[in-house]
Image (cartoon, grey):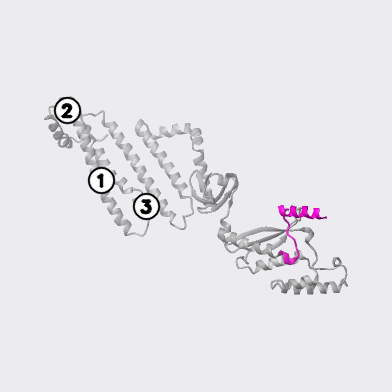
Amino acid sequence: MVAPLPAYETTFKGPVTDLLARTGLDEPYLSMAVLGVSVLLLFMVLGLLAKALNRVLNNAARRLAGNTETRFDDHLLDLKVPRYVARVIPLMIGYRSIPLVFGDLPSWMPIVEKAFMIFFIVLFVRIIRAFMLAVRDTLVDVPAYEDKPLNSYVQVASLVMYLIAAILLFSLLTGRSALTFLTAMGAASAVLLLVFKDSILGFVASIQISTNDMVRLGDWITMPKYGADGNVTEINLTTVKIENFDKTITTVPTYALISDSFQNWRGMMDSGGRRIKRSILLKANSIRFLEPDEIDALREIRLLRPYLDERTAEIAVHNKERGLEGTTPVNGRRLTNAGVYCKYVDLYLAQHPSISQSMTRMVRHQPPSEMGLPLEIYCFTNTTEWVAYEGIMADIFDHLLAVHRYFHIVLFERPGADDMRSMVTAEKSR
């Protein structure tokens, strides 16, 4: 309890009592009026002092922020820390003034003292939290921390701070020691674990995510289970926010990034190349050996001319050594339209300016099926930008689909309405 200050009481309440006594008020109304006016005057003085200190601290903080390069002091201003700090001294003066105002009501003094202590605890909690938020906002601009789950760390620290504040408030309001509160919490630990399960799991997940560098802010991740396909915009203690490419927001539990499978495209973005993996379906019964005049016609294609010259010479030597010249094509080696087309696709990709030549590039046959023979193009673009990637891929396949006729090969596709009408017309004309 605050020690009484009789000298200040004489100078403070005496004039107020004399002034109100002249109005003709009698007891007990006079005592109540003196108390009310004293409380009002005290709060007015404290309020004016808080405003004056707030203005002084704000001006000093702005001058300091203008003379420093760090953004920390700017964030402190934005979070109104000077205003919170300006209230500390008025609260201390008010606490010390309790005996002056409530000296005639000793039973009220413990209640008012507890009220001031509650204000102190709440105020210091707000100041400390504001400092933590300012540190977080400052570290976000530092390259080493911009992709770290700082929100999770701030939330964990805030949770611990709130728990300590709750223990202090419990001890203050009940008059019991903090050990009693902790003992009661130990008995209810099962309930607390159930209530704070998501927070505890999220805290553990945040540590693992940060330590193992699994996900960073800005990463493109895909989680089909949650319908998430987009960039990570926020990592909190309990949730991860993902902005999908259709501009919707998917919220995923933080612990799901540890317990469930997800795909992170950061490796692709860091490599500088994005994979193309698509197939062109060749109609199986259109694959055949090329005739000599057809090979001569294909020599007009600049990319193919060196390959055809080398290949035909190699095949001629091979067949001549084995006496297979002029025999049935099946007996010797021959160029096929599918093989030459496959080589052309590879040569075309090798000279394409938008295809990375330092990454894997190949054109391969997939197992034949009822859809024909899939000719798979596997390569990487030299950019990861989505729009540019789609444009490059469209340009490549437009070209490859357009030139297939030069190789006397047919691409497979399901019959369309025009095909069906042609079939019916041909059938009727028979």
Q: Which residues are magenta?
A: 404-430
- Secondary element type, mark 3: helix
Q: Are discs 2 and 1 less than 8 Å apart at CB?
A: no
Q: Position of residue 230 (x, y in %)?
A: 54, 51
State the residue position of label 1: 51
Q: Does the rendering let one see residue 198?
A: yes
In this rendered view, identify the residue nearer to me: 213 or 6. Answer: 213
In this rendered view, identify the residue nearer to me: 143 or 264. Answer: 264
- Secondary element type, mark 2: helix
State the residue position of label 3: 75
Q: Residue at x 60, y 66 (%)?
A: 354
**Residue 235 against residue 328 in the figure, above or below:** above
Q: Residue at x 38, y 45 (%)?
A: 129
Q: Is residue 420 magenta?
A: yes
Q: Is residue 380 left or right of residue 109?
A: right
Q: Position of residue 146 (x, y in %)?
A: 47, 55
- Mark 2–mark 3 distance (CA, rounded to whole Å): 50 Å
